Image (cartoon, coloured by chain):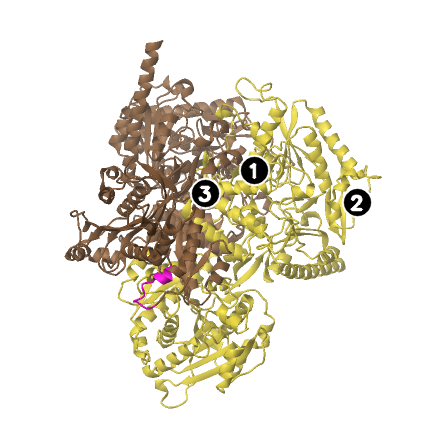
Chain colours: A yellow, B brown
């Protein structure tokens, strides 16, 4: 069975067929994810301008597809969809395709029968009235938004020449449909507005999805092989507005269907064709071929040169200008071109689906995934990601669908863009690559790097930072931060000259970092050394690791059964009495600066002092050269929220001792926790801070280490050798800087980020507090931490089911992927993570599903336990 | 003085003015760098299609600019340039602008006088014959390429209304020029071909540069302030081909002048305008405003929404369709729009130049450059990079020019793209950002990552590698390589179970790397530890560094006074006798595999064995866990070429001992040394290899660590804890992978890389051997290493003038920057580095200049020395 054939019912009831668009099987899918079948080719027909012949191409394809006689002979169905039609009913492209196909069929006396139909599903009132005025079939009432359920329908049975007058059941079908029609022959956004018949992008996509779905499968049990091809014809040029005002290339982007571009063969047409092609590429579309009408200018020559022959360019014969010409002889003459085009479309489709299917196996053979035990990832567990649109992946689902999944792990916590920002970033990336590529950084200046430095210093570094050091990722940003901190420490404590040997080495000084257990700062050796021993740092991973730190056990906070509570580490628990309550009435209480005066604050202080004294007692040459913390939430350590009071106390004590303070905001920075920096929540300022991940909106690697002027000054002097001799080739690369500039501005602008509470520098709560609380009450749930874009849920687990290597939650996550939510666990901790601009509606929908699935999961575990109890 | 005013001669001789285009002052500039003055605004007028009114906009701007009466009253010059005109002389846009301006002037009775002129510089024979046939002025003879020096010229003195009949010297000027004209009214590439009057892009740019230069400055000594504005009107749409077939948006890209886009107000015009805008952005252009003719469709509304109000959109009144209308009243009616447009152009220009001028100071305040002693970089030493085009930067020069410099340090050795590849990469970056943004890597697969893995394994990893581990830069790739190697070593030597403590730590094993002195592997701690102590690794830089290696002194090779010679390290020098010659007749001799049988080979073997024995004698728990080398050339260590025989011997000895071999090809990989990998030159294969820099063509950070299947297998098992737990958020990010896919294919394809010797997997010699040899004979030169894209020259220096911190060569490099060559030194080593596709012509020109400047530099140093000798 060729990949573009599907099984379909032989006995089609016209009536059923007509009604099935609104049949119950689709109702439940409303607002469901965008998806389409991979069982047969579906192409979008684009054009570089209006009136270039998109509809002629569609009609020509219908003829070529349905009249081809390739062996083995099989039934065929050609589906033509026109989602947006203006100028209706005078202009109706689906009617044109229907009529021309019928005319062509009759003129050719083809041997087999074809059933042809044309329908118009919804229309504005003025357009519907035109049709009703003509006394034609109409059904349904108001649909809302001024669009009427028109259900206009016409059909023809075309008898094959070999039927000898006996009625032969049609073996093939030509199905033409207009989805939405407006009366005025203007741009859809104008028509929709003027006729008070607006429609949202998601409704258009939803109806389109239902049509695509419907056209694939049959209506009854009896099945036979049918070859199907669908085309979706857009309106106007590639960037012409749709009814909502969204450009059509943006409107249809969630599907990202492959396309055919109808170009322009006239003078000036080379330019228009290339530009239209580039607009489509800038939205991530693939174009299988370009086709245009010949105007004698040989436009195909420069076009092929531009494409470096990688995109086929086809030239159609000149179209008769005589309006009375029925074009049938033109279609006849053009059949070789349409047949080539059809073949290209079919073979491109085959190539694409074959590639999609072979990708899991090929990836298992060639990749070495990070943090992955390959033995535990069989081919069938590999996710094929065809594209992303805003927060959603499009993935290959059950090998015959492309379906959306919400990227709920925010692709390792990097993601921020919604679909609009993604398209803006794409254009900026193209522009920046074209303008700069990458240029050398040291001693040079160029706009994206300078602009970003300015934004960082007036944003996340405001009030304390004066210098920006660029690198590539969180780990390198931390390595740089440590180098900065150590130098500053040595300089502040006048150890630079005293303790240096004559050869410039200071082996006798043993510098340590002060850090929290459970923290994670990256995987390069320097960053590893600043972490307490863990699965990530063992001898198995890097024999050179020794753990050069004083690692403290921090108190944590989380929501337990509806209540926010502090959990103290063991050492503190013994001395807890009299230090005040460990429960809070709300999450906000935890962050209050007034807690500085609490008993817990004194407990924290004394515990910290004790640890520091212990260290200096042990070894007089050991010094704490830096404090490094992830403010507020430790990410990789299991989404642990640290008591902010404890971190503030730690910072205060370090500042008192002139120990440079590093905030590792790689995970927490840029609104991840609901504020631009987590430092704001601690009410204190570091000497050095590291940013990466969300800084570029999550599109491209870039890191920045911000530093105070005092830190910078520890490196100035007369010799280059005193400078910080650390750098990466792509330091401050233009594309990363440009992406960061756009994203930082986007996230903090109320016009683009609807989640911002104006003038408060705060995101509104994205995870509904009441639902979060309910989740925390579920028996299967141990604790919940919801803050900003993060909602982390620790599943109740014990023994080997807990911890980093646990696969305890994997069945739960597998079910959620089926629901369209792509999550990754941290052992038995699962989490939802959205972008700073993700709508609360979306968050609500995600959380609802997660609630339901955890509930189910809990019941299953209980049943298991009960069964187990019965057996043993 | 406003930035867009310049000093210009009052007394203009028409004759001089007319001839100056070809006067001697320009001859010497032929083939010089693209540059243009920043003294006044120069804009390119683009259009989204033909016949949208570019010329009307140009004419309208001339009227608005020259008739404005802003105080203080000053002289003005409006320059209109039409580089490419077809349909000539029937169509002549410069003549139209000239005539309309004169008509408008006369109709308005303006108070001041204006001198207006129109000239046509060069024309095809058919076009020239048309003019000559009309008996008009013509000069000059054949110009070659079928283009004739036409020098057609017309002028008018327009007397101001306040002159009262007395001849008043014109205070302002309207200068209109057509640069190249063809007869047929078709696309320039067709006209040029059909009229046998081809012209190269560089000739067009050169004439344009000369016109821009000429229009800025006056012809005689007497000066007065003149406000100037220049516009360059393109032909057809933005992506219409120019005479050579290059798209115009590509043709004019080296200038990257700001632009005005004339859009389309018709039905379908929104799409065409947006697409044209995007094509311009995809080439790095800035567009100051969009302007179009009103067709009553309110196209400005969706356009402004698309632009998010960041690009002004102006609407011109509907243009009279009556061909007899002289348009003067339309121009009159449109003056408010043109005045707004002019104001936008002026203020954008001011903003741009102000920003360019403030950038050095701002960068000194906000940046913390890597490897830079800020105290040694005053504001005036900062280079402002406005853009890059292929191998060239466009930099701010002497504060009033934008001028090209060849990026001869290849921006820290990352660069590969020529101008064509850069534009292709820009489109790919836009596409990939739009299609994927970034998506999660582990357990997932997406096309760019898989395709890249396939290309790497069948390319640089062919024959030995089976796995690709992605990270962000060379340093992280090395950290990963070390982790891989150590695990493999422990596994191969069955040390995993034996030497592990119960807590999973194996403290008793001391693993070291075997490495070469002078090597450099990155700045994160793990990579640093694999390097011998140096300026980069001192206590000042990272107190945690200890140097966990056995570091060997390698023999080096270089060209000394025309002869390739091996320099042995001290330890070997004592035992040299009888080990054969150290000189080679050619560079190729050095790489011959047959040297394995030489006496030197035995010397190398015994020296290596001795070192290894020494280590194991010292400490039985010390093991060499990995060998790491930069094959063939050590980059940061001063461009030292290591004797390939020595490296091969080292690899052989390590393989014999099951010590995993790591090749750090971050610098040497992807044609840097003339082959896709430097490993090919050594005739041996590593177990692990690191790639970065040139892999993406130099556009974006990405690194790959390739590994053999045996290495991979040391990490497989039943537990996730046995997996390699190292990763970076943006592992295998789609944009990096897509850039690498395009670049790798581009560099190894004979159709795109003209330097490839077909079927030999070898670049032709880019640096002419004879000239390189001559350089090696210069007294100021100590040694030369030229290989692939690299030509390194060590300047003779002693004491503090030698070594990493030396600034000995800085005056030499400053002079070379003035020559348009941007170089950075490694202490007293300077180098030229081009891309794999850079033409030999370009290399020759660079090397010629370098030769001349080093020669001068040597003479100066000699003189200094002589003077010093006389004094003391």
**Label 2 belongs to which residue?**
A582
Q: Nearer the observer, disc 3 or disc 1?
A: 1
Q: Secondary structure at mark 2?
A: loop
| Same chain assignment for discs 3 and 1 | no
Would you say residue B324 sits in the magenta stretch? yes
Q: Is residue A814 left or right of residue A778?
A: left
Q: Chain of mark 1?
A: A
Q: Is residue A460 left or right of residue A384?
A: right
Residue A539 screen position, x and y as percent = 59, 36
Residue found farthest to the bottom: A165
Is A243 rendered above or below residue B178?
below
Residue found farthest to the right: A578
Q: Which residues are magenta?
A: B321-331
Closest to the observer, B709 or B453: B453
Q: Give the alpha-carbon distance from disc 1 to disc 2, as whole Å.
A: 35 Å
Whether residue A855 is visible here, answered yes or no, is yes
| Same chain assignment for discs 1 and 2 | yes
Whether residue B495 is visible here, answered yes or no, is no
Location of the N terminus of chain A (image quadrant): bottom left
- Which disc, if any, is residue A705? 1
Asked if the residues shown at circle 3 and circle 1 are in contact, with their CB atoms under 8 angstroms apart, the answer is no
Residue A97 screen position, x and y as percent = 40, 77
**Label 3 belongs to which residue?**
B708
């Amino acid at each position: 069975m060729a990949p573009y054939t599907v099984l379909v019912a032989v006995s089609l009831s016209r009536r059923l067929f007509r009604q099935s668009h609104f049949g119950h099987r689709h109702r439940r899918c409303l607002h469901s994810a965008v998806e389409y079948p991979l069982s047969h080719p579906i192409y979008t027909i684009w054009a570089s301008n209006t009136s270039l012949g998109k509809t002629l191409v569609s009609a020509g394809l219908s003829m070529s597809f349905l009249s081809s006689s390739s062996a083995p002979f099989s039934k065929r169905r050609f589906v033509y969809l026109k989602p947006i039609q203006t100028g209706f009913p005078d202009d109706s492209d689906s009617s044109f395709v229907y009529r021309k196909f019928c005319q062509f069929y009759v003129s050719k006396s083809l041997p087999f029968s074809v059933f042809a139909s044309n329908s118009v599903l919804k229309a504005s009132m003025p357009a519907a009235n035109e049709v009703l005025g003509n006394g034609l079939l109409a059904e349904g009432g108001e649909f809302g938004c001024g669009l009427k359920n028109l259900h206009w329908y016409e059909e023809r049975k075309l008898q094959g020449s070999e039927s000898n007058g006996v009625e032969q059941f049609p073996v093939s079908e030509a199905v033409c449909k207009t989805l939405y029609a407006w009366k005025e022959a203007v741009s859809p956004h104008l028509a929709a507005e003027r006729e008070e018949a607006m429609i949202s992008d998601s409704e258009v996509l939803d109806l389109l999805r239902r049509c695509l779905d419907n056209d694939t499968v049959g209506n009854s049990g009896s099945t036979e092989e049918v070859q199907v091809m669908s085309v979706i014809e857009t309106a106007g040029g590639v960037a012409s507005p749709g009814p909502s005002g969204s450009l059509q290339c943006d409107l249809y982007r969630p599907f990202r269907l492959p396309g055919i571009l109808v170009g322009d063969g006239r003078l000036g047409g080379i330019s228009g064709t290339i530009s239209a092609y580039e607009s489509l590429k800038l939205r991530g579309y693939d174009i299988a071929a370009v086709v245009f009408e010949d105007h004698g200018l040989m436009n195909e020559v420069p076009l092929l040169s531009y494409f470096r022959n990688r995109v086929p360019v086809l030239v159609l014969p000149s179209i008769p200008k005589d309006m009375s010409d029925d074009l049938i002889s033109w279609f006849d003459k053009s059949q070789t071109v349409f047949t080539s085009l059809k073949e290209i479309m079919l073979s491109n489709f085959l190539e694409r689906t074959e590639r999609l299917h072979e990708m899991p196996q090929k990836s298992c053979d060639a990749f070495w995934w990070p943090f992955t035990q390959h033995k535990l990832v069989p081919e069938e567990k590999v996710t094929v990601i065809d594209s992303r649109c805003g927060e959603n992946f499009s993935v290959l689902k059950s090998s015959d669908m492309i379906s959306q999944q919400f990227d709920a792990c925010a692709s390792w916590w990097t993601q921020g863009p919604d679909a609009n920002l993604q398209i803006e970033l794409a254009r900026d990336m193209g522009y920046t690559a074209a303008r700069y590529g990458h240029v050398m950084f040291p001693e040079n200046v160029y706009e994206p790097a300078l602009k970003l430095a300015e934004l960082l210093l007036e944003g996340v570094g405001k009030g304390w930072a004066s210098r920006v050091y660029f690198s590539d990722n969180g780990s390198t940003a931390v390595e740089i931060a440590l180098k900065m901190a150590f130098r500053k420490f040595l300089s502040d404590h006048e150890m630079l000259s005293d303790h240096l040997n004559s050869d410039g080495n200071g082996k006798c000084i043993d510098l340590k970092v002060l850090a929290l257990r459970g923290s994670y700062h990256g995987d390069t050796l320097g960053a590893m050394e600043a972490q307490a021993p863990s699965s990530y740092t063992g001898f198995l991973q890097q024999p050179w690791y020794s753990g050069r730190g004083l690692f403290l056990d921090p108190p944590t906070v989380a929501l337990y059964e509806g209540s926010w509570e502090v959990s103290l580490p063991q050492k503190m628990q013994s001395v807890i009495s009299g230090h005040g309550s460990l429960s809070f009435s709300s999450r906000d209480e935890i962050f209050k600066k007034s807690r500085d005066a609490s008993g817990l604050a004194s407990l924290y202080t004394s515990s910290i002092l004790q640890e520091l004294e212990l260290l200096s007692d042990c070894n007089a040459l050991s010094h704490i050269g830096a404090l490094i913390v992830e403010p507020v939430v430790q990410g990789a350590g299991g989404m642990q929220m640290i008591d902010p009071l404890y971190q503030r106390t730690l910072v205060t004590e370090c500042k008192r001792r002139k120990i440079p303070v590093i905030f590792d905001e790689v995970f927490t920075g840029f609104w991840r926790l609901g504020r631009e920096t987590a430092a704001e929540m601690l009410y204190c300022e570091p000497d050095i801070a590291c940013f990466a991940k969300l800084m570029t909106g999550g599109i491209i690697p870039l890191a920045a280490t911000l530093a105070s002027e005092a830190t910078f000054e520890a490196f100035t002097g007369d010799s280059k050798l005193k400078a910080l001799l650390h750098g990466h080739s792509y330091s401050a690369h233009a594309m990363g800087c440009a992406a960061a500039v756009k994203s930082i501005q986007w996230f903090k602008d109320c016009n683009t980020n609807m989640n911002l509470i104006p003038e408060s520098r705060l995101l509104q709560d994205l995870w509904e507090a009441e639902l979060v609380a309910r989740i925390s009450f579920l028996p299967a749930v141990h604790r919940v931490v919801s803050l900003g874009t993060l909602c982390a849920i620790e599943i109740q687990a014990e023994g080997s089911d807990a911890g980093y290597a646990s696969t305890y939650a994997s069945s739960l996550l597998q079910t959620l992927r089926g629901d369209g939510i792509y999550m990754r666990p941290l052992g038995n901790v699962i989490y939802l993570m959205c972008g700073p601009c993700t709508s609360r509606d979306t968050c609500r929908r995600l959380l609802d599903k997660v609630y339901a699935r955890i509930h189910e999961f809990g019941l299953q575990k209980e049943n298991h336990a009960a069964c187990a109890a019965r057996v043993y």
